[in-house]
Amino acid sequence: MIAPRAARPLHPGAWWAWSLGLAVAASTTRSPAVLILLAAVLGVVVTLRRPDAPWSRSFSALVPLALALIALRVVVAALFGARTGEGSVLLRIPQIPLPDWAAGVQVGGPVTDVAVGRALLSGGQLAVLVLCVAAASSLASPYRTVRCLPAALHEVGVAVTVAVTFVPEAVRTASAIREARALRGRPSSGIAGLRGLATPVLEGALERSLRLAESLDSRGYGRRGDVPPRVHALGSAALLTALVASGAAAYGLLGGAPYGVVAALVAGLAAVLSLRISGRSVVRTRHRPDPWRVPESVTAATGVLAGVLSVLIGSDALGIGPSHLLGPTGSAAVLLLAVLAAALPAVVAPPPSLSSPTTPATPVARPLVEVS
Amino acid sequence: MNGPLVRLDGVGVSYEGAEAPVWSGLDLTLDEGEMVLVVGPTGSGKSTLLRTLNGLVPHASGGTLHGRVTVCGRSTRTHPPRELADLVGFVPQDPAGAFVADVVEDEIAAAAENLAVPPVALRRRVEDALDLLGLADLRSRAVGTLSGGQAQRVAVAAVLTAHPRLLVLDEPTSALDPVAAEEVLSSLARLVSDVGLTVVLAEHRLERVVHHADRVIVLDGGGATPRVGPPAVLLGTSPVVPPIVALGRTFGWEPLPMSVREARRLSGPLRERLADRTPAARTVLPGEPLVVARGLRRVLGGRAVLDGVDLTLYAGEVTALMGRNGAGKSTLLALLAGLRRPDGGRLSVCGAEPTSRKPVDRVRDVALVPQDPGLLLYGESVAHECATADHEGGLSTGTTAASVARVVPGLPEDRHPRDLSEGQRLGLALGVVLAAAPRVVLLDEPTRGLDYPGKERLVEVLRGLAVDGHAVLVATHDVELAAELADRTVVLGDGEVVADGPTREVVHQSPGFAPQVSKVLSPEPWMTVAEITAALDLVPGGVG
């Protein structure tokens, strides 16, 4: 029996470490069993530990997208997939003859079980990746996540704060406008109800974003500490150098040019320098920072462990075909267990504390009407 | 710190493309521990004035600032709002739209975090702010779930943790019920007297604030120089006055009373004159019942927002719907207008269950003007709006234009609805929904942001509708409006009807909902200045 624990939000860093670990597992594994288990683990933990806040609905909103990704992958593979000839033919799509300049591209033709299996697998991988990110953003408050960022990145924080409120606000504006249209006798549902909705909704959401930016400004967001302008200029120069150098590094490394490594080193140094300088120029403190306790460590560890094991065991241990779905070997069993262990946060993490929007307001003790 | 807290030298603001500046030539110094009230009709530049004090004008909203604004020696020219955040706390109109965190406690801490207040001091400031505004119970609530009054208090607490010297508030009570408004204002008054904070606020509902104010700034609009002075002097000649001042001016009371207490002391002779008179009864002939609701219930997230509401609305009667924020007023209006389906009980509007009808038929029975009337409008211009309404409602050409003209004559036809004044926009929205000739007219909080002339006009229009046989229901926090307008008042509390009767009786039973005149002359049953002048055959507003 677990002793009752005080509700509190888990440190956002723990949720992100957990979900990124699982994301690594998803992108390195080639096993349908592991992918299915990952999706199940994500679903269970999100369901049990998600607070009731507007931002925590992103998981359910992204599930259809994940499914659509798999379907899209299969359809694309069936229509344009490479014809390797492996496996048995499931169905034949009439092939469309293409002109010579499109040689190498094939539309239609036989669809084999191996091709479909491969598409299902890669689609599934992508879908689980999406679910990992969705899970983290449903479980960890974006506001709190932003507050954990290093001071130098606080501008990113402003952008995220505005962005996070943009979508729910747009949805609210949209429903208010549709309701108002019903008051003018216009149909409020169906396609007809959507007509001419975009402009006022965007207008409203933008207006609100401006108000929010103003409010952030009035409350001292982005105040500069006592940093001389010259140091500030140096920080900007370092940032610019880092950007240019990393561009050059990418070009060099990918193209095998010898300056690639040097450019990468320069980029790294400049980035660190710029972060340090701008970190000094933004001075802020934290009110009641989220503590990092045992549940945080357990949560982060289970996710990271699954990721590390998946990388170590390698991609081919479990085979790829549907026939391997239920036949894990020894090391594969370890991986499956590790993924299963990643469901632990559903019990180990404290229940979320954010009160639900539907909880009745605390009644204020005051007489409304003194009936004599 | 030597010198004044805030200094304005010949300050004016103008926007590009406008003929005249919003206002100009303002010289003003603010000292510690003052409460200053900014007064003026809609569009006279009250918000602009407030926003110059922390540099939002011109840094955030553009425009040209003439003259010089300095706060503790820092000029707003060289210091953007974020560099003034430790001196000026700014609470915008509708603060719920400007929250930067998702939980009350984080919201309150945000400003002080940005100022790098050391963690130990920060923790104490947050606790102090929670206590000062009575928010300790709400600390872990999501900001989206707060009621209007709570949100307003959170917004004030959120700027207080920065320990500003000056607090600027734009219409802090316009969305609040009378009791919540009094709570916010008395918290502010306490801050002024206890910690020497200076407060500058704009407010349309003068009756709520004027007795707290040390000075007023009157904006007359049209680019004129604002007038600054003590309230008793400036309100003696202002066209915009609360009922208590109107009463004092009518009967020549000296000094002009600003609070109910002062007025009661001066009201002896008036009481004697009124002793043998009674207020003229409104000649109401309630017609047939148009709305009949029995045991109406609406459940949201496991909580009954409306719990067994019985309500009958009669043709020819104006009813005020009152109750604290979150009591279920807006939900009741939404049910009556057919926007939501009741979860229990029976409802008939003009003989039909509203949700059973198609929107296009429903609007011929019942019209609702929501809190933000702009939502109803989507035309490119006033003329386009009217034409669209004719077309969509299947009305003959010109019907809507005629209906709008009855409500607000002389609207500029080519103006975009967004560019109309608050009162004009409300009038346009009301005219548009009235074009379908509904018999039931519902308004949600129509006087928010409306100045006194706008309010007077609204009262006239709505009384006219009642005379024409409409049933009118107005949800409002404005007790003065209810007193002037409504034959009957219904009070909702926690989803139930707690009072329903003639306005005079209902408001007399409850100090929270009593208008100023009735507080002054209690226990006598007078509610408005107009009633008294009518009973004594006087000209209102003049010196009697």
Image (cartoon, rainbow, N blue to C red):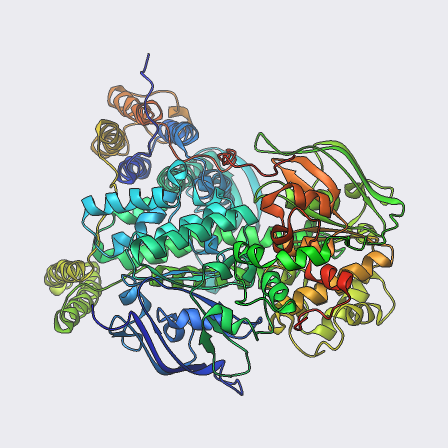
Judge by depth and name the residue closer to the eye, B79 or A140. B79
Give the quarter of the figure containing the C terminus of chain A: top right
The image quadrant that residue A262 belongs to is: bottom left
Say if A193 sits above or below A247 in the image. Answer: above
Which residue, as the protein is rendered here, is positioned at the far bottom? B19
In the image, farthest residue toward the top: A1
State the image quarter where residue A335 is shown: top left
Name the image quarter holding the N terminus of chain A.
top left
Q: Number of numbered discs present?
A: 0
Left or right: B144 in relation to B393 = left
Q: Is residue B357 left or right of residue B187?
A: right
Q: Where is residue A187 in the image (x, y as percent from the top left)?
A: 73, 52
B341 vs A113, left or right, is right
Tell me residue A310's x, y (percent).
25, 32
Where does residue A253 sit, x and y in percent of width and height?
18, 59
Asked which quadrant contains residue A241, the reply is bottom left
The picture places residue B236, in percent across and down from the top left corner, at 56, 72
Residue at image x 56%, y 49%? B178
| Residue B63 appears anywhere in the view | yes
- Residue B203 lies left or right of residue B118; in this view the side is right
| Nearer to me, B38 or A360 | B38
In the rendered image of this protein, does residue B55 appear above or below residue B186? Answer: below
Q: Nearer the viewer, residue B537 or B344?
A: B537
Tell me, yes or no, if residue B430 can be seen here: no
- B288 lies above or below A224: above
Seen in the picture, residue B112 relative to B198 is either above or below; the reply is: above
